[in-house]
Image: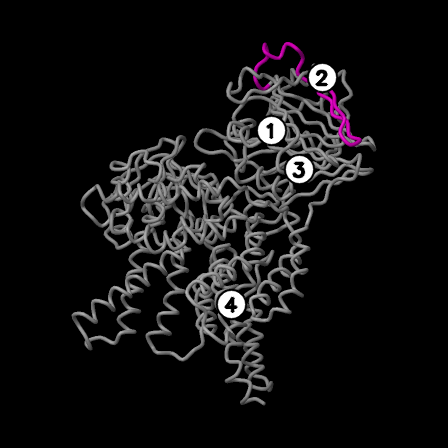
Amino acid sequence: MERCFCPEHGMYPLLLFTLGMAIPPWLPAPLPWHAPAAVAVLALSGRWPGWRTGLLVALCAGLALSALRIRLRLDDMLPPAWENRSQSVELQVIGLAHYGLISTRFDAQRLQLHTPDAALPATFSVADRERRAWPAGSVWRAELRCKRLHAYANPHAADTERWLIAQRRLANCSVRQRRALPARSSLQAGIGQMRERLRDRFARVLGDHPAAGVLMALTLGERTGIDRAQWDVFARTGTTHLVCVSGVHLGFVAALAAWAALRLARRFGRGRWPPRLLACTTGLTAAGAYALLAGFGVSAQRALLMLAACGLALALRSRWPARKIWLSALALVTLADPWAVTQPGFWLSFGLVAALLLAGSGRLCRPGWLAGNLQAQGAVSVLSVPLLAGWFGQLPWVSPLANAWALPLIGLLLTPLSLLAVAQPFDPPLRWAADLIGLAMSPLDWLAQWPPWTLPTPPVWTLWLAGIAALLMLLPLWPLRLLLLPCWLPLLLARAERPPPGEVWATVLDVGQGLAMVVETRRHVLVYDVGPGNADWNVADSTLLPYLAGRGITAPDRVMLSHADADHAGGWPALAPRWPHSQCQVSQPEALDARWPCGACRAGQRWHWDGVDFEVFWPGNDAAALETNASSCVLKVTGAAGRSILLTGDIGRASEAALLGLPLRADVLISPHHGSRTSSGDDFLAAVAAQHVVVSAGYLNRYRHPQAAVWQRYADHGMTRWRTDRHGAIDIRLGREVGVSAWRQRAPRYWQPRDKD
C-alpha cells in the first residue's frame, strides 16, 4: 500500500505545502512560526508510516515558512514610537513618481538612516505636497515624517492594508526638506530611468490622445493615465485584467518570442540548438524583459514565476502531466510570495488555468479549432462566476463576448505592436499603436452599455459551494452538470439582510478626515455626506460605492450633504451623475457646482420612512448668512422604539447653543466637527445625553481631531467613544436596544495593533 501511494499521489505533499503557505496570510493574528516547525520535527522523529509523515511535514513546513515570512515583514514595519517624528533618511526613488493635483507620490527604498535610533521600513511610500520632481532612481537625503501602514477599513470594500503589505509599502511618509545626492548605479535604477524617459516620450508624442493611458498601461505597467470613464468600460465588460500587465500579457509575449525563435532557428541554424530549450529560453527572456519594462510589480513577478515553472518542465522534457506543472507553479508562487493568495489576480490566474485543464481532460477526441475555443471560453466563464462574485461583487453579462474579442486582440496584436512601437526611435509608430488601441476599444464601449449584474456580498459558504460546483461542472459528465446547477442558486439569489420595519441601521464609514454615512430603513436609504474628494480623486470610489454595492443598494433615495466643504461633499460631483434620481439636500445650495444642483435642508423639514422619523433641526432660513461649518444640516433619526441618532455635520458651539431648546436627546451622537476644540460644548453634550459618540477622523490627521480635551469630555459625559481612525467603519443598529460595533473588531487583521481607547 505504501509503494502504491507515493507514485500515484506524489502531488499530495506539494499540495499540502502550498496549502500551508496559503493559510497564515488569512489569519486574524500572527501564527507563531516555531509551532508548526516543532510539529514537523516531532513528526520526523516519530514512528508514523512514511507517507503520513511526509504529508504532515509538508503542511507544517508551509505553515512555518509562511508564518516566518509574515513575522519578518511585521518586524520591518514602522515602530509606533517613530510615528509623526522627523527623521533624516537617505533614500532612493523606486519606479515612477505620480504627479497629482495635490502632491507628488512615489515609492522609495531606505538606503541609510542618519537620525540616531531611528527606524524605518526597507520600502515605503512618500508624498510631497510641494509637487517637486523626483526622478526614477534618484538618491536624496530627506527629512521625513512617517505613519504606520494604515488605510480605510470598511465592510464590502477592498482590503487596502492587506494589499499594501503584499506590495511591501510598509509606511506612509511626508517629505519636508531634501538634498540631492550622487546617483547610485544599479539595474533597478537604470530600468526606472528608461521607463521615465518613455513616459515623458508618451506625453510629448501622444498628448491627450484618448488611448494614451491604455498604451502606457500595456507597455510600462502604469495605469494612472487611464481615466475614470475608461475604467468604467473595462469594469462593465469584465476586461480590467487586460490592462494590468500579468500572466496573459507575459504568456502571449513569451509564446510569440518562442515561435519567432523557432522559425529563425529552422531557417538559419538548423540543428544547432535543441528546439525546446531554445523556445523556453527565448520565451522566458522576452517575458522577463517585458516584466522589467512594466515595472516588475508583484503581479508581473508572479506571472514570470508561473512561466518559469512551465518553461522548466518543457525544457527538461518532463513527463509531468499538466496538472502537476500547474501545481508546481502554484507552489513556487506561494513560496516566493505568501501574500499572493490574498490578491484576486492570483485566484483568477490559477483558477482560470485550472478551468482550461479540467475542460480538456478526459476527452475521447480532440475538438476542432472553433469548438475548442468555445469550450475554453465556456470553461473560463463558468469558473469566473464565483471568483468575480467573491472578489468584485459583480458579474459582467457581456464579459465572455468582450474577452473573446479583446483577449486575442490585446495579447496577439496590440501588446506586441505597442512594445515594437516603444522600441522604435520614431514617433509615428506610437501614434499608430494608440490609434489602433482606440479602434479596438470601440466594441468595448458599445458592450459597456449593458451594466453588470451587481451582487450583494454573499455568505462565504455560497462562494465555496458555487466554486466547487463550477470545478465539477467542467468535467465531461453531463448528468453531473445538470445536478450541480442548483448549487449556484444560493450565490446568485443571495439578498442583503434589511432592517425590520421601524428599525434603523446606520454605518459611519471610514473615509479619513471627512464624513460619509449610510442610514437604512426597511425599504429606503439615506446617504449623509459623501466624504472627501477633488478633481483628481474621491474617496467614495473605494469606500461608499463598494459599501452600497455590497449591501445591494444601487442608489440612495436621498442624499443630504451637511455642507459644501470638500471633506463632506467633495465626492458629490463624481456621484451625482451616477444617482440622477436621488433627491439631494445641502445647507447652502449656492455653494455647490451648478451642474449638480441640490435643494436646501431647513429646520422643520420632516419625513417618515418605514416607521422611522427623520427631522431636520438646523439650519434656519438664514443659512446663507452663516459660516459654512456653522450652517451644517443637523438631522435626527428616530426609530419606532424611540431610539435615535443625531447627525451634526461640522457645527460649532454657537450653532450648538442655538439648538439647546430642541429635543436633542439621542442614543448615538455623530460628533460635531470631528471632535474639534470649537465644538461639543458641555451644555450641548448634556442635552444630547448620548450613550455612544462616533468621531469620523483621519489617522494622525494634521488637525489633531478629535482634540484630547474633547475626547475626554465625551468620557466625562458617560459616552462610549468610537472613532473611525482606530476602529474603522462603525455600525449602529437601533431597535428596541442600541447596538454599536466596529469593523476592525469584527474583522481583525494580524498587522493591526490591538484596540486602544
Query: Which circle's residue, 1 or 2, is located before the other in the chain?
Result: 1
* Residue occupied by mark 3: 507
Q: Is residue 418 above or below residue 2?
A: above
Instruction: Tell me the quadrant of the picture where the N terminus can be found.
Output: bottom right
Q: How far is mark 1 from mark 2, CA to CA?
A: 21 Å
**For the magenta stretch, what is the residue range?**
604-629
Does residue 623 appear anywhere in the picture? Answer: yes
Which of the marked residues, 2 or 4, is nearer the chain's N terminus?
A: 4
> Residue 123: x percent and y percent?
40, 50
Q: What element carries label 3?
A: strand
**In this orientation, does residue 71 appear?**
no
Q: Distance between the residues labelled 1 and 3?
A: 12 Å
Disc on res. 659: 2
Percent coordinates x, y for residue 190 in the rendering = 25, 51
Labelled disc at residue 359: 4
Q: What element carries label 2?
A: helix
Name which residue lies at 20% across and 67% down.
264
